[in-house]
Image: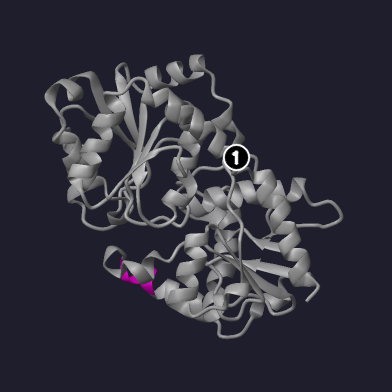
Amino acid sequence: MILDASPLLVRSAGVKNYIFYWARSLAEQAGENSISLFPFLRRPASFTHQASVLGPLATIPRLGLLFGASVCPYPILNCFTPASDIFHASHQLPHPPRKARLTSTIYDMTTWLMPDLHVAGNLKSSGRNAERLFRNADGLIAISKCTRDDAVRLLGLAPEKIEVIYPGIAPAFFQVGPELANETAGRYGLNKSYVLYVGSIEPRKNVGVLLDAWQELAPDIRAEFELVIAGPWGWGDRRVYDRLRSGIPGVRYLGYVPESDLPALTAAATVFVYVSLYEGFGLPVGQAMAAGVPVLTSIVSALPEVVGDAGLAADPRSREEIRRGLERLLLSPTLRPELAERGRVRAREFTWEACARKSWKFFERIAGM
């Protein structure tokens, strides 16, 4: 099969993380199958969310090919891809080659459910993907049951066409020891117990309401704990970003944190908070559970599906519920280890090995249609 790994060439967070680990695990679990990465990529050893996995001289011509393929109304990639049973297209590629059976991944349906939280380019791209990829695909992968159900309801896709295959959690999050966690936290100047959020600063992530709920906590709680926000600017109203950059007492904004530091930074946290308005899966929550950190998340979208009974949940639009959830965790030293242990057990259900095995069965089924 050919996996379109073009998200590895651009600035991206969740999708890039997914493609990087999925490609590695597919190769490791291939058996009699084979996998190649388009456009003409070898498996990268590492990645950063902020830049291509290749240098500029190698990235530019590949992006040029992708641009040409996107603006040309004909499938010119037929001339640039070898014969294969399956071509798994990314959302960067509206005109995939037609020599193979077509598959793709549905990550979330947020542009249909919350169009006001997205820029015009995102909305246009999502509509194009629905018409040219999802409707024409021989089979689709959804990263959660919630995502599949939303896609069926909003796009009218046949449910039997979509298989739910959960993504995995990077092994490093399961393996962090206390010494590395404390050393990494110290390197970032985090010398107090802290509540951690990891994710981009964009409207859907609901960081503004989180900040409001935090500032409504009792002064003695905020004196004992810091709120740490780790993630780059994404898009939307910059007031939340400017608020973070202004320096709120008791709130630390770290900006972008390299992927290599995230497991230890997460493991050193006292509580992990992620009260997003909508997630197709919610990988940071799974990572926190794997690292043994009790979680407060949202009662909406796929997040309850991921957390199960291993964390607390709140209405993300309610500052009151978020504040109460934070208070319950921060003031309950017996509850935190109980949830941490439940989280570790729950997180073991989401491994890249399991994801790859299920994915190969899916591809074999589609190829044999």
Q: Is residue 155 left or right of residue 72?
A: left
Which one is in front, 279 or 22? 279
Asked if residue 87 is positioned above or below residue 287 in the image, the reply reads below
User: What colour-coding does the image apply?
Assistant: one colour
- The percent position of residue 355, horizontal first and vertical second, equals 66, 50
Dominant SS in magenta: helix
Secondary structure of the residue carrying tag 1 is loop
Q: Is residue 190 left or right of residue 172?
A: left
Instruction: Tell how many labels.
Output: 1
Q: For mark 1, what is the residue?
A: 46
Q: Residues within 10 Å of mark 1 (few under 14, many from 20)?
A: few
Identity, as a three-letter code, of the amino acid under mark 1: Ser
Which one is in front, 255 or 360? 360
Residue interval drawn in magenta: 119-123
Which quadrant would the N terminus be assigned to in this image?
bottom right
- The percent position of residue 237, horizontal first and vertical second, equals 21, 56
Which residue does the image show at 51% across and 81% down from the upper left?
Answer: 131
